[in-house]
Amino acid sequence: MIDIATLQAALIGYQAKHDELTAKMAEIREQLAGKPARVPKTDAAPRKKRKMSAAGRKAISEATKKRWAEFHKKQKAG
């Protein structure tokens, strides 16, 4: 017998899929009716681009060079 938690999780998953399919069907119906598809609005502001300091870039560069040097050293040793 399947436990209640599994059934509840399945129901939640099926409901989410149902909502997704309903939204897609509405979009197709709008296109068939000649209306432009609506783009859902998001309340989130666009993310700001992160800036890395010169010291951070240098540290990453040095670590990468060190890893590749070790890799090539192992390749030569074979």
Image: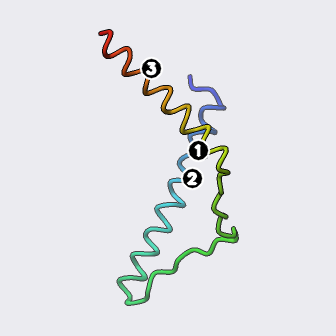
- Would you say 65 lies left or right of 11 here? left
Q: Nearer the viewer, residue 62 or 18?
A: 62
Percent position (x, y) of residue 50?
A: 65, 57
Q: Nearer the viewer, residue 29 or 38?
A: 38
Which residue is most to the bottom? 34
Specify which label sits upstream in the sequence, 2 or 3. 2
Q: Is residue 52 above or below residue 61?
A: below
Q: Is residue 53 above or below residue 5?
A: below
Residue under pointer 2: 15
- Would you say 66 lies left or right of 9 here? left
Camera-near label (1 vs 3) is 3
Specify which label sits upstream in the sequence, 1 or 3. 1
Residue under pointer 3: 70
- Would you say 34 lies left or right of 51 here? left
Callout 3 amino acid: Glu
Percent position (x, y) of residue 67?
A: 48, 26
Residues at circles 2 and 1 in contact by the CB criterion of under 8 Å: yes
In what element is the residue under mark 3? helix
Label of residue 11 in the image: 1
**In the rendered view of the protein, which quadrant contains the C terminus?**
top left
Percent position (x, y) of residue 75?
A: 32, 16
